Amino acid sequence: MDKQTFQKAADISVELADRWYPPVSAALFEFGILAPHRVAAWIGQVGHESKGFTTLVESFDYSVEALVPQFGKRITPAIAAQLGRQPGERMVPLERQARIAAIVYASRYGNGEAASGDGWRYRGRSLKQVTFRANYEACGHALGVDLIAQPDLLATDDTLAARAAAWFWYANGCNQLADLGDIEQLTRRINGGLNGLVDRRRRWGIAKQYLNV
């Protein structure tokens, strides 16, 4: 896959392709994501997670109405009404975003309780949006970086952001799901649910077209 093919497969600008082709191609090689149908599936999923290779940090800028559908029983309607985007606000202030993350990601996958702040500290980062302390620890061990102490590296270092996405894919058996063409199970493995399935399917279709899958 050359840079021009990557740009078309990922449906991104030339500028974004210039930025991401070197770290992405190196990361795919490092973690053995080489067959065209696997690369297409990876681009489709990662493209959705990163909003078209444009964002490396999870946002908690949710409207009041969106919070409960997004996080279900992990946040009550009363808390959503308090912390979600209020009338006249252009975005949820970071202090309230941190409180949302602390609540919905508390006591899961190595995170401490809400008061620990782990939900915000280990929110989604990298092209894949690696989330939770346990995943940061495993990812850091695999990549040779202390991500527990320096979680922001996954959002400030493009090489690590791409390597983390390829590592998660490899470590969680996503190549095998791509071999089966099972986008629903692949999405569950990546996301924990089926959020964004329509967009993931669309991006996968574009990538398959340009990678001749």
Image (cartoon, rainbow, N blue to C red):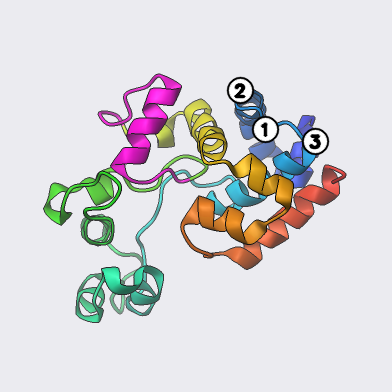
Q: Which residues are magenta?
A: 129-150
User: Is residue 11 visible in this depiction of the protein?
Assistant: no
Residue type at numbered disc 2: Glu
12 shown above or below 105: above
Q: Residue 144: within the magenta?
A: yes
Real-space CA distance between mark 1 and mark 3, rounded to the nearest whole angstrom: 19 Å
Residue named by callout 1 = 33
Real-space CA distance between mark 3 and mark 2, rounded to the nearest whole angstrom: 21 Å
22 shown above or below 155: above
Please name the residue shown 71% across and 61% down the image.
Answer: 202
Q: Earlier in the sequence, mark 1 or mark 3?
A: 3
Task: Indicate which disc residue 97 carries.
Answer: none
Residue named by callout 2 = 30
Relative to residue 127, is residue 175 drawn left or right?
Answer: right
Please name the residue shown 25% across and 80% down the image.
Answer: 77
* Circle nearer the viewer, 3 or 2: 2
66 shown above or below 8: below
Q: Position of residue 104 (x, y in %)?
A: 27, 61
Q: Residue 191: within the magenta?
A: no
Residue named by callout 3 = 4
